[in-house]
Image: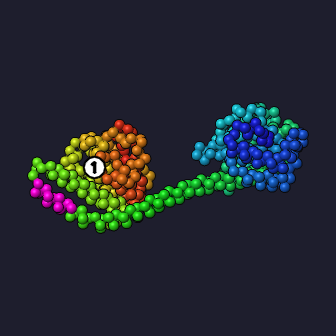
Amino acid sequence: MWYSLNNSASRSNTLQKEYTRFSSFPMAHSLRSLRNQGTACKVSPSLITEYSSTLHSFLDLPVFIDFALDSVLGMVDASMGSFFIWDEYSKELVLKAARGQGHERLQGSSIKLREGIAGWIAEKGFPIRVEDIRNDLRFPKEKSNNRYHSYSFLSIPLVSENKLIGLINITEKENKQPFSEEDLEHATVFSCHIALAYENLKLRQRLKEENQQLNQKISNLNEQLKQQEALVSLGKLASHLAHELNNPLDAIRRFVNLSLDHVSQNSPAREFLLKAKQGIRRSIQVIRGLLELSGINGRTRIRQADLHQLIEEVIDVIRHDPNFDQVVIEKRFCTKPLLVEDCGLQTVFQNLFQNAHHAMNGSGTITIQTREQGTQAIVAIKDSGCGVPETIKARIFDPFFTTKVSGKGTGIGLTICREIVQRSGGEISLENEEKQGAQFTIALPSNN
């Protein structure tokens, strides 16, 4: 049963392309012609070699299986057959293709080892020919099984490097005669090529997937490199700004403080000076944030630390902060210590707690949960605030982006958090539901 347009029409574009490519092979036309004329195909070593070469040319697994099954049926002049693949996870043979009358009922069927003749053959690992099941002493329980017009069949396990990969069953010879030893030999030889080509195809698919993953990693690394290059430039700018602005700003702040000492409490000038002092303070915060983001402040030394201890120390600090009097800290720590590489993680937790405080307008609950997940330590910090609007969710880690009113934030805090987490070998992400609070999740490599 060679490919037909009706079979291919229901397949994807990929299968249709494979069909077109296969149909161009000379041997496909010659075998179709012989089958249509009712002439048995003469199997020669060169024909098996040619078919085997074609097996290695397929890129799509379903098309490969169809071609392999149709080829082996054509070689032994059979009209019915099935192709099973061994599923290592479920430990059973799963039907992938079937030909012949009533093959629709076989769809989705599977066979376990030692289950029926096929399961017995798969376990033994060698091919068999049954000339007449009614007289075969090896399978006494199958004598009354009359599912086919013929009582003769071939069953051939597909084995590669002593590993079972599948099974081919062949029944119903076109002329209704029993299968011969020559049929078994041809089918067995070709099945060896099928097993090898199948393994090669799976290997190509695995390499393709690994290449795609590698390309994705390279793309991510290139993106990180661009970010690092931007941070280097930012660091140079921050260093220059700090050098050029720190001294003048410090002098301005001193003169503003002196001026405030000479201005009465009710003077309009006092309000102007306080506004100026607030602007100076924010300018200093921006410069310090730039330095921290660029890593020029020298506090990027990596050390091993207990994640829980780092969090506890930050919690201890904010509990003594009057601004957090109306904030409840709820801890859900896992029972075992979580050792991580620390590159300034306390700054991350402090920034996230401050953001949560702002999101809750100074009153609510901050929940901190930790867990071990494989080789990672996970910490989730959730607030009971209003959440982050979906319209700005994608921008929250961008430098200088802030939702706070002017003078209340620099827009660098979350950017610093992401940079520190990445330097510690981890990733930070936002899980958010509007009006139900925001949750920042940090995944760090664990050294446990």
Q: Main secondary structure of the magenta part?
A: helix
Q: Please state which of residues 314 and 447 is positioned toward the viewer in this rendering.
A: 314
Q: Please state which of residues 269 and 257 is positioned toward the viewer in this rendering.
A: 269
Instruction: Name the residue: 58% across, 46% down.
Output: 89
Q: In the structure shown, which secondary structural element does the residue marked by tag 1 occupy?
A: loop
Q: Is residue 253 magenta?
A: yes
Instruction: Name the residue: 31% across, 46% down.
Output: 404
Q: Amino acid at mark 1?
A: Lys
Instruction: Name the residue: 76% across, 45% down.
Output: 20
Furthest toward the front, the residue is: 268
Position of residue 228 in the picture relative to residue 122 (left or right): left
- Quadrant of the image containing the C terminus: bottom left
Instruction: Locate residue 141: give its quadrant.
Output: top right
Percent x, y of residue 145: 75, 33
Q: Please state which of residues 342 and 235 is positioned toward the viewer in this rendering.
A: 235
Q: Is residue 246 above or below residue 390?
A: below
What is the crowding at mark 1: few (fewer than 14 residues within 10 Å), some, or many (at least 20)? few
Percent x, y of residue 408: 27, 49
Percent x, y of residue 328: 25, 43
